[in-house]
Image: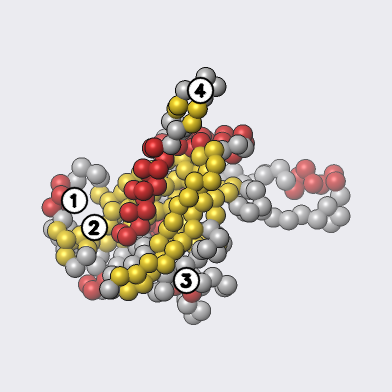
Amino acid sequence: MSELTTKKETLPASLMSDLLSGEGVDYDTSELQIPFVRVIQALSPQIKKNDSAFIKGASQGDAFNTVTGDYWNGEEGFEVVPCLQQTKYLEFIPRDQGGGGFVGELSADDPNIARATRTGGKEILPNGNELVKSDQHYCMLIGSDGLYQPVIVDMKSTQLSVSRRWKTQIAMLKVKDAQGVLKTPALFGTVWRLTTVEQSNDMGTWYNWSVEKVKMIDDEALLQEAISFRKSVQKGEAKAVVEDHGEKAEDAPF
C-alpha cells in the first residue's frame, strides 16, 4: 500500500477520523489491479526520458511497480512474503511481425503448448505466435516504512531458473515445532529478499532476480494479510488485469 503523510497540525482532531475513514473508496474490486514488479533492462521504457512510462531516478537493474511507478534499487532490493505461485502460458505476436503485443493466455492443458517448437531461443506456436511461460509469484511486498502491499513478481525466460531455485528452497525448508519435530512451514510463513544481479552470455548482458531467505514471518498483521491475499487469489477475487500481461519481460537481450 502507498502511504500518505498527514500533518496533525493541519487538521483538527475532530476531522482526522473522517479523513482516515476510507469513505468513498469502495470501488468495484474487479477493476482494481494487482501490480507487477519487474526488472528494468537496457531497453525498458522506464529509463527513456521521452517515453510516457519513464520513471525519474530509476536505472537499469532496478525493480519497479507497474502501477504506481515506485522503484527499488536493484542491489538493495526489497522483502516479500510469497503467498501463492501460478504458472501461466502467454501468447504474444512476435516483434518481427510488427507485434510484440499480448494475445491471450493458454490453459495448461492446451495441446498447442506441446506442439510449440524452439526457434532462435523462443518457443513458437503452430500459428507462428510466441509462447512465453511465466511463473507468477503472488507476494506481499514489505516497504521500508513497514507497510505492505500485494504484488506479482512474474519470472519469464532466463528468470525461470531463479523461480525454480526459489520454489526448491521453499519446499526444502524445515523448522522445529514445539515438540521438536521438523515441519515444513506454509508458503506464506517466510520472508525473502529479492535483489537483482547482472548476467551475460555471448548474446548480451541483462539483469536477473536473486532471492535470499530472510526469516520466518514474525508479524501477526502481515501474516493475516498474506493469508487473506492468498485466499482472494485462489477464489479469483484478486488477479492481474489482462493489460499487464502484455508487457513481455525484457529479461534478456534475445
Q: Earlier in the sequence, mark 4 or mark 1?
A: 1
Q: CA distance from mark 3 to mark 2?
A: 26 Å
- Dot 4 crowding, Cα within 10 Å, few <14, some 14–19, many 20+: few
Residue ID for mark 2: 131
Residue ID for mark 1: 113
Residue ID for mark 3: 60
The disc placed on residue 31 is none
The disc placed on residue 180 is 4
Q: CA distance from mark 2 to mark 4?
A: 47 Å
The answer to whether the residue labelled 2 contacts the one labelled 4, judged by CB atoms less than 8 Å apart, is no
Q: Position of residue 94 (x, y in %)?
A: 24, 67
Q: Name the residue type under label 4.
A: Gly
Q: CA distance from mark 4 to mark 1?
A: 45 Å
Q: Name the residue type under label 1.
A: Ile
Is residue 2 left or right of 163 when viewed as pictured?
right
| 132 vs 142: above or below | below
Is residue 11 left or right of 144 when viewed as pictured?
right
